[in-house]
Amino acid sequence: MTQKKMIRTTLIACLFFLAFGGWLPHLRIHPLAKDAKNAIPLISGILSVFFFRFFFGSTLRLTQPILRTVFWLSSAL
């Protein structure tokens, strides 16, 4: 493993554990079993990670017209 890949892996792990460490106390305040609507931010966060990965990944040239249209429509509101 090269040094660049090692640093990248370490930073991704740090971000994951930082987010997980914030999510655990949040679960104590708003348990999922008490109210199911508390799972909506979790689900939308996971979906947005995959959504942005798809649109800004290697298919950027293919999806660029769609992104420009979405940006234009959102700025027109």
Image (tube, helix red, strand yellow):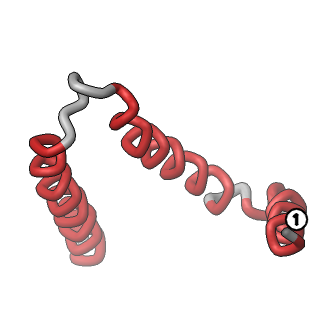
Q: Amino acid at mark 1?
A: Leu
| Left or right of residue 20: residue 53 | right
The number of numbered discs placed on residues in the rendered structure image is 1
Residue 34 or residue 26, whichever sits in front: 34
Residue 72 or residue 60, whichever sits in front: 72
Q: Residue at x 56, y 54 (%)?
A: 53
Please provide percent x and percent y for residue 7: 22, 74
Q: Which residue is mark 1?
A: 73
Q: Residue at x 27, y 63 (%)?
A: 12
Q: Quadrant of residue 11?
A: bottom left
Q: Quadrant of the C terminus?
A: bottom right
| Left or right of residue 40: residue 33 | left
Please provide percent x and percent y for residue 51: 60, 48
Q: Residue at x 24, y 64 (%)?
A: 15
Please provide percent x and percent y for residue 72: 88, 71
Task: Describe the element under mark 1 as helix, strand or loop.
Answer: helix
Q: Quadrant of residue 2?
A: bottom left
Q: Residue at x 41, y 45 (%)?
A: 41
Q: Quadrant of residue 60?
A: bottom right
Please provide percent x and percent y for residue 73: 88, 65
Any part of residue 1 in sight: no
Residue 12 or residue 67, whichever sits in front: 67
| Left or right of residue 13: residue 69 | right
Residue 33 versus residue 45 in the image, above or below: above
Residue 35 or residue 11, whichever sits in front: 35
Q: Residues within 10 Å of mark 1 (few under 14, many from 20)?
A: few
